[in-house]
Amino acid sequence: MTGRVFLIGAGPGDPGLLTMRAAGLIARADFIAIDALVSDAIADRAPKTAEVVYVGKRASKHALPQDKINQLLIDEAKKGKIVVRLKGGDPFVFGRGGEEAEELAAAGVAFEIVPGISSALAGPAYAGIPVTHRSHATSLTLVTGHEADASTGIKWEGLAQLDGTIVFLMGFANLATIAERLTANGVSPDRPVAVISKATTPEQRTVTGTLATIEGNVAKANLPTPALIIVGEVVKLHDVINWFESKPLFGKRIVVTRAREQASELKRLFEESGATVIQFPTIEIAPPESFDSLDAAIDKHFDWLVFTSVNGVSAFFERLFAKRKDVRSLAGIRIACVGETTAVSLRSRGVAPDLIPDKFMSTALIPHFDADLQKIRIAVIRAAEGRDEFIDEMRKRGAEVHLAVAYRTVPVALNADELHDIDVVTFTSASTVDNFFASAPSLDGALLASIGPTTSDALRKHGRRPDIEASIASIQALHDAVHAETRRRGETP
């Protein structure tokens, strides 16, 4: 049986610009041949069963020659596999997708083209530069900058006659030649130019100038590759429509230490505010060594169930359903929880908590319980690791308290290579603090952000003062506190 090859455009860099069709095919792939500029977040969508081969190039160094890539796609498809050729941008915009499609057709291999968003369009858009505009440009021309030298077929005299926008892709190394050729053929040296480095990513930087000044401006800015070159009057709109690089946390490098399976919401919030997020999980969530104590909390009658975290809620309900029970089992039981995020998790399962303390710490529950708790049965659902002050106090007041271990936090082996030029490190629990400082290097100059008092106390035990503490124990509040503090410091003279 012959398989099928999908020539897929992965988009310009921002993984959020991947099309739904592309995402679905990547998830089904048996074999993926991937270019160098495809983001790690997109590459991570590959199934664990898929074979992934990197075949792209950087700085003119090919991981695999084009003829070998063509043959690889053919060979893998003839083994009956779903083959994905994952290319940056769009496969037919200077991506050699046309050549690969020709070879597949000649070999009799079925294939499909999945267009992607080209950096030629997305890059200028993320820099606030519309490639067409009724007042500035009614045409758009795309040119490969690889051929911007004396031996190319570029018709410079023709380009020079165009009043619209010209986008040079892969031409960063030939910026001086491009400027010289255009002006030599009659383009005004005052024609606006923009160079966009690492377009659509949190590392994006845009430098503007004219054909006469752009080379010096770019050299002064020390821009890295890859980069796009935009020539035309539309460049003047960069300062007006610069929506991406003006995001509140743009340019900030923020570490998220939360367990990877929990980090998505915090990561999303920071990325939507423009930050570069470094996922540095210090813990993993693991099942308890025994379910006996959790089963007891489910099977026996208690007056109160106390949840101290979202993880406890998730583990409790997963076990409840595994035992073929549902929320009806909780009828007549009062529910307390620590933190608004934990409360949201309960509500999403149809349970409205009766008690939520103002502070994100179990001891904040204590004032809400009576002084005499004789004959009151309380089950506390939490991690194996945890503080016992609440449990101890409830027992002093006469309650029968059952500790239900719902999960464990397990340290993760850390690789600190990514921890450079960090602006903020966020902590969402005491365990993330302990594991981070047990194995990570010191981060001079980085702000330390805590989700609440218990996490802040853990930082102080390691001799570190929290620079930022969320007003309430929620992911949104932590994001907002980081935003507010970095803005305040940025405005301080």
Image (cartoon, rainbow, N blue to C red):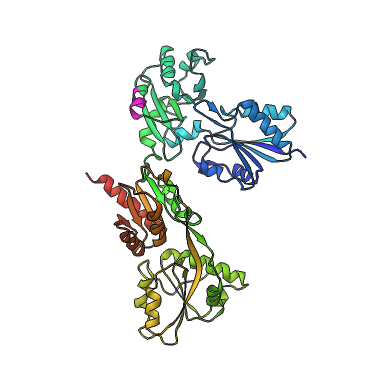
Q: Position of residue 119 (x, y in %)?
A: 50, 33
In this view, the residue farthest toward the right is 1
Residue 39 located left or right of residue 97:
left
Residue 174 in magenta? Answer: no
Span shown in magenta? 216-221
Q: How many marks?
A: 0
Residue in view at x 51 percent, y 40 percent:
39
Residue at 46% across / 16% down in the picture?
A: 160
Q: Position of residue 242 (x, y in %)?
A: 38, 37
Q: Please provide percent x and percent y for residue 67.
A: 64, 26
Is residue 347 shown to the viewer in this render?
Answer: no
In the rendered image, the residue lying farthest to the left is 493
Q: Is residue 275 above or below residue 372?
A: above
Quarter of the rendering containing residue 471: bottom left
Left or right placement of residue 299 versus residue 126 in this view: right
Does residue 34 appear to the left or right of 173 in the view shown? right
Instruction: Look at the image and tell me whether residue 159 can be seen.
Output: yes
Dominant SS type (magenta): helix
